[in-house]
Amino acid sequence: MIITIENLVKTYKMGLVEVNALRGVSVDVEEGEFLAIMGSSGSGKSTLMHLIGCLDRPTSGKIIIGGTDVSQMNKNELARMRNKKIGFIFQSFNLLSRMNALRNVELPLIYGDMNTAVRRERALESLKMVGLEQRVNHKPNELSGGQQQRVAVARALVNNPAIILADEPTGNLDSKSGAEIMGMLKKLHSEGRTIIMVTHDRTIGDNAQRIIFLKDGLIVDEIKKG
C-alpha cells in the first residue's frame, strides 16, 4: 500500500463550537491506483484530501505514506514530505499571476538544491508533457482556463511525485477542457502514477478505478470497478 489511513479524526474548533470534519475514516490506497473521493459539500472530502496531502495534521488517527507515518510530523517535515512525494492539482489552478508558465511550474523545485539551469530544463520538460511548450512565456491571464489547468498539471509533475492529488480538477473548466484534463490524468495513471481525486461530479468520478463516498465525515459507500 502506498497510503494507509487508520481511524482518521479531524476536529476544528470554531469559537466554542467543535466541528467534526472527519469522524474515523480508514482506507488503503494501492500503489498505482486511481481513487475518487466523492460526497456533498461538508462531507469531509476536502479535509481528507488536505490530510493526505500533508497540508494539515489529524486530531487523531494515522496516515502512513510510503511506509512513513506523517500523522505527527511538524510543519517542516510535512513540507519536505509534500515536496518529495506529492503533486497537487487544484480547482482554482493556484498559479501566481505575475509569473509566466515556466516560472510557475518551476516553483516546487526552488525548495531543493537544484541549480537554475537544471530547474528550467525540468520545468520545460514538464510543460512539454502537457503540450504547452509554445506557451512557456505566457502569464496565467494570457492563457485559457484549460491551458492554466495544464500548467497546474505540469507543476504537479515537475518533482516526479509518486502521488498526484487532484481537488475538483475540472470544476472551473468547460466540458471540452475538462475532458482534456481527465484524459491527462488517465494517461498519468496508465504510466503508473497513484492518483487521488476529489470531485462532486459522478461522471468525473467514474473515470477512477474506485470511488469512496463520504457523508458527515464517514465513508458510507464504496464502488470498485473491474
Image (cartoon, grey):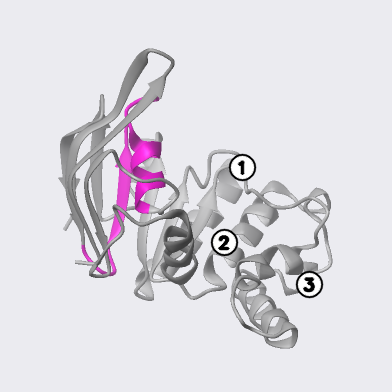
Is tag 3's residue or tag 2's residue first in the polypeptide sequence? 3
Residue at image mark 3: 134
Residue 145 at what x, y percent from top left? 69, 47
- The residues colored magenta run 30-52
- In 3D space, how far apart are the residues under numbered discs 1 and 3 (Cα atoms)? 23 Å
Amino acid identity at mark 2: Val
Locate the N terminus by quadrant: bottom left
Q: CA distance from mark 1 to mark 2?
A: 12 Å
Q: Check the image and name the residue furthest to the top.
A: 16
Magenta span includes 216: no
Q: Is residue 204 visible?
A: no
Q: Quadrant of residue 139?
A: bottom right
Q: Which residue is mark 2?
A: 153
Q: Left or right: 145 with respect to 173?
A: right
Residue 209 in sight from this viewpoint = yes
From the image, state whether disc 3 or disc 2 is nearer to you: 2
Q: Is residue 219 above or below residue 188?
A: above
Direction from residue 34 to residue 113 in the image, left or right = right
Q: Residues within 10 Å of mark 2 (few under 14, many from 20)?
A: many
Element at label 2: helix
Residue at image mark 1 = 92
